Amino acid sequence: MKNKSLVSINDFTREEHVRILELAGAFENRPKQKILEDFVVATLFFEPSTRTRLSFESAATRLGARVIGFTDASSSSVQKGESLRDTILTVSNYCDIIVMRHPKEGSARFASEVAKVPIINAGDGANQHPTQTLLDLYSIMKTQGTLDNLNVAFVGDLKYGRTVHSLVMALCNYNTTFHLVSPLELKLPSSVKLSIKERNLEYHQYTDLQEVIPKVDILYMTRIQKERFSDPLDYEKVKNAYVLRNNMLGDSRSNLKILHPLPRVNEITTDVDDNPKAYYFTQALNGVYVRQAILCAILGVVD
Ligand code: CP
């Protein structure tokens, strides 16, 4: 993984995914080690973020790295009309690795082609969010003891949800049975569904959430991605399509865990938070260990 960019989840092999999870386990046991003291990490966020940016910055800082960057492109020279190419070429001179979030699909791939340092895609539009996927895999592994042969439900905005796209692709390596719950307007794109079909894996599509809950080991809830809709009226029609309440979990499996990449709006009511099956805040914590593992693997300080 040394010096490789991580733009798509498929840029790393299944074996490399497993290695990241092993390394993340080691960092969870010992998160404060000064093994990145010689490195500078740049975080360029052209789109809002709480978890991804702060967990990357926490991961880097706890390992002794320096962090530079911006949280809002309006405070950078992009505001003056500078291109993404020139921004990336310039920032490449100041750091050893760039973590970038951008609203345009394909922007992270473009950045990786012009940058002199590795690029980590922290989300490019509705396309992919590979580091979220690695922390999702880590969370599934920790809670289920395996990644193999699980029933996983994806619920909500399967069209625009980049975390869904990357995780579906990664789980195609593990004989997963997919349960895809969405409004008809927000079904999983055929390009992502192709990954499931190519592996001859089972998938079922639903519009009703309740009938899926007893069938699954992982319930992956997602927010309807308001910012991706070109017509606000289309968003209004689907914004409350799915709301998970605690009283809906009565028939769920004993090993069920509820994941959500967060932020949530109203798709999980707060009465679910105290249910032991709710795992989304621990999932967000796992992001620190997984991102420590990703930084160290790409910077080449671990094998
Ligand atoms: N899960 C996730 O990407 O969260 P943020 O948008 O807060 O980074």
Image (cartoon, helix red, strand yellow):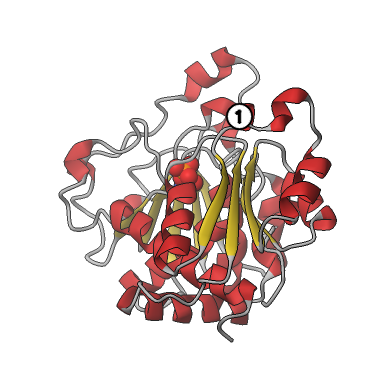
Element carrying mark 1: helix
- Quarter of the image where the N terminus is located: bottom right
Spot the residue most to the bottom.
Answer: 303
Q: Would residue 296 be found to the left or right of residue 252 on screen? A: right
x%, y% of residue 61?
A: 43, 61
**Residue at the spot of label 1:** 75
Residue nearer the viewer, 169 or 29: 29
Label 1 beta carbon within 8 A of ligand 1? no
* Relative height, residue 225 to residue 97 (above, below): above
Give the tally of numbered discs: 1
Q: Would residue 237 be found to the left or right of residue 4 on screen? A: left
* Relative height, residue 85 to residue 300 (above, below): above
Spot the residue most to the top.
Answer: 233
At x 74% / y 62%, what residue is drawn?
117
* Relative height, residue 230 to residue 171 (above, below): above
At x 40% / y 44%, what residue is drawn?
262
Residue type, mark 1 in image: Ser
x%, y% of residue 203?
A: 56, 58
x%, y% of residue 186?
A: 58, 34
Residue 44 visible in the picture: yes
x%, y% of residue 215?
A: 36, 59
Residue nearer the viewer, 281 or 158: 281
Which of the 4 image quadrants contains residue 104? top right
At x 45% / y 24%, what residue is drawn?
239
At x 59% / y 86%, what residue is drawn?
303
Residue 216 visible in the picture: no
Q: Badge 1, how many Cα within 10 Å: few under 14, some, many 20+?
A: few
